[in-house]
Amino acid sequence: MLKELNRVIEYIEDHITDDISLEMIADYAGVSDYHFRTVFFHLSGLTLSEYIKNRKLSEANKDLLNGERVTDVAFKYNYQSMDGFTRAFKKWSGCLPSEVSKSNIGRSFPKLSFVITIKGGKTMEFRIEEKPAFNFVGVSKRVPMQFEGINNEIVKLAQSITEEQRMEMRAIQNLAPLEIVNVSYNADHQFLKEEGELTHLIGVLTTIEETSSQLEKVPVGPHSWVVFPNKGPFPSILQETMAKAYAEWLPASDFELINAPTFSFTKTDPNNKDCAYSEVWIAVRRK
């Protein structure tokens, strides 16, 4: 995967003045659009579209420093209007494009290069499980992105579940893991900066189709799932496992992501409230 990522970086450089679509890039990389964008984010900390925008503006800054006209530079990098280019450039650099050549002060955003870094040689335990089509059924709401610590909105969601909803979930639950699961899906594009929201569902797995209106049903097709078990302080160990799965395991594996909800469950240790066993489930397919 690292080879494909670096090839894409060079592809972007070769087409920096073109109108580059994310679908074209994923096709060039030979993987699904969803897989490429997700892995790119977890390795770089940037959305692919944000990276392309930053590189375009960085190259535009060079051209402005070399005395090129603002109008020519704006259209060179595929901005459809001067206003759009001016707003984007000012937000990125803090100054107007027309001020660059006068002040002779520029800002740069170098191209990325992906390399393998070995950190401690720690292995990641995982297993692959096959599942038929099923439904996530439970209670959901839009919650803010949060990669570290307790998400208070998810806590409120859990507290909002009624006894009637719990009874129905227990009655229809018929597919492993036979646990109450936390499901994440439909993330906003700004999830990298923790500025957006995603839908979070607390519920169960079931093959039963008929459910009441008090619960939401999210259908999922038959997929392979990579499962990462972990044990340690909650929620940090779960969040760390999730990050490593995307940033370390996936790029080195023979699998790519499927655009399906990710889910997990956690079982606390009654003798140690700060320690818990968790599993992270991610839908994948072989490349």
Image (spheres, rainbow, N blue to C red):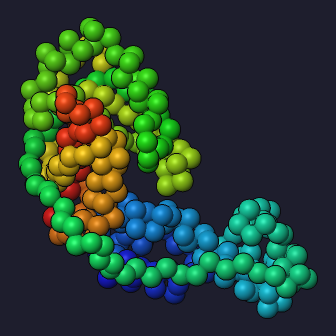
The residue sitting at the top extreme is 164
- Quadrant where the C terminus sits is bottom left
Residue drawn at (19%, 61%) of the image: 124
| Residue 80 can be seen in this image | no
The residue sitting at the bottom extreme is 66
Where is residue 37 drawn, in percent x and y? 40, 63
Instruction: Compare residues 287 and 125 and report the one nearer the observer.
Output: 125
Residue drawn at (35%, 47%) of the image: 236
| Residue 108 can be seen in this image | yes
Where is residue 252 drawn, in percent x and y? 23, 72
- Quadrant where the N terminus sits is bottom left
Instruction: Compare residues 76 and 237 and report the one nearer the observer.
Output: 237
Q: On the rendered structure, is 149 left or right of 15?
A: left
Q: How many marks?
A: 0
Q: On the rendered structure, is 63 left or right of 208?
A: right
Where is residue 195 drawn, in percent x and y? 56, 47
Please, is residue 224 above or below residue 81 in the view?
Answer: above
Instruction: Compare residues 99 and 23 and report the one nearer the observer.
Output: 99
Residue drawn at (33%, 64%) of the image: 247
* Image quarter of residue 248: bottom left
Where is residue 204 drawn, in percent x and y? 20, 28
Residue drawn at (87%, 75%) of the image: 98
